[in-house]
Image (tube, grey):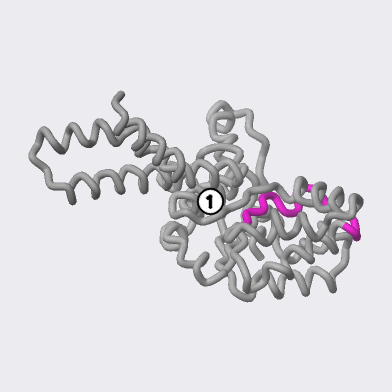
Amino acid sequence: MNLQQERIQLACETLKLESLHSEWSAIADHCAGNDHTYADFLERLLQVEVEARSQRSRETLLKFAGFPGRKLIEDYDFKFATGAPRKLITELSGLAFVDRAENVVLIGPSGVGKSHLAVALGHNAIAKGIKTRFISAADLMLQLATAKKQDRLEAYLKRSVLAPKLLIIDEIGYLPFGRDEANLFFNVIAQRYERGSIIVTSNLPFSQWAGAFADDRTLVAALLDRLLHHAHIVQIAGESYRLRGKKTAGIAPKIDQDEVNNTAN
């Protein structure tokens, strides 16, 4: 390496141009060998750095999101989940609702792919550079209660609840909340109202949400008023995707179809 190359690499390090630091020499050789202009060389350098920074940003966003796995809209089995509104889900995958700070509520029985769709929409958001956070309702309540006990609730809300442009809360109603937890959850919904999008999933119809929130119907009415004011409600009917193999073998538990049909009421 000659002195000029050392100076270039030092400048790249100083300016934190990590990709240029490792790629500029090869790009220079390529452009020189193909009779490219100085402008071509500069454009390619900048493209490499922009692409690398975008990739690092997506990796950082993905780590912050905390997804339980990788799920994609195109992997969702609409043929099995015959009750899934494909047109609406396809529209939501464009994420215009995030720009408008609107919410998405996925309602349906266990196993129909609510969490799959929520995570898939989250991955779409990450691909577009949108800061996203995924968390189960039970974990959210545990973290909120811990933060409150440690007198750092405001800091937690600012970092984990308000900072993401899209907040995904999975499995509302899976475990019932006590009164303090219900109040904390209401605080989450109230603080994000018209400020950021929320995706929630639940296997409970709205008429049964009070049972999951300390039987406080007044609180639930106020919560749903804010959550549903600017919301897309995705009602999914059908049987459990996870149990389809057992059904074929004749060992799946019997599902009350009337209960399934009433889930979104």
Q: Where is residue 85 in the image (x, y as percent from the top left)?
A: 47, 59
Q: Is residue 122 above or below residue 30?
A: below
Q: Could you tell me which secondary element the residue under label 1 belongs to? A: helix
The residue that appears at 36% across and 35% down in the rendered structure is 7
Q: Is residue 216 left or right of residue 20?
A: right
Q: In this view, does 222 lie above or below 175?
A: below
Q: In which quarter of the image is the C terminus?
A: bottom right
Q: Where is residue 100 in the image (x, y as percent from the top left)?
A: 52, 72
Of residue 189 and residue 130, the one placed in the foreground of this image is: 130
Q: Does the magenta stretch include residue 177?
A: yes
Q: Where is residue 215 in the image (x, y as percent from the top left)?
A: 88, 63
Report which quarter residue 108 is drawn in: bottom right
Q: Mark 1 points at which residue?
A: 122
Say what amino acid the circle numbered 1 marks. Gly
Tell me which segment is drawn in magenta. 167-180
The residue that appears at 58% across and 29% down in the rendered structure is 246
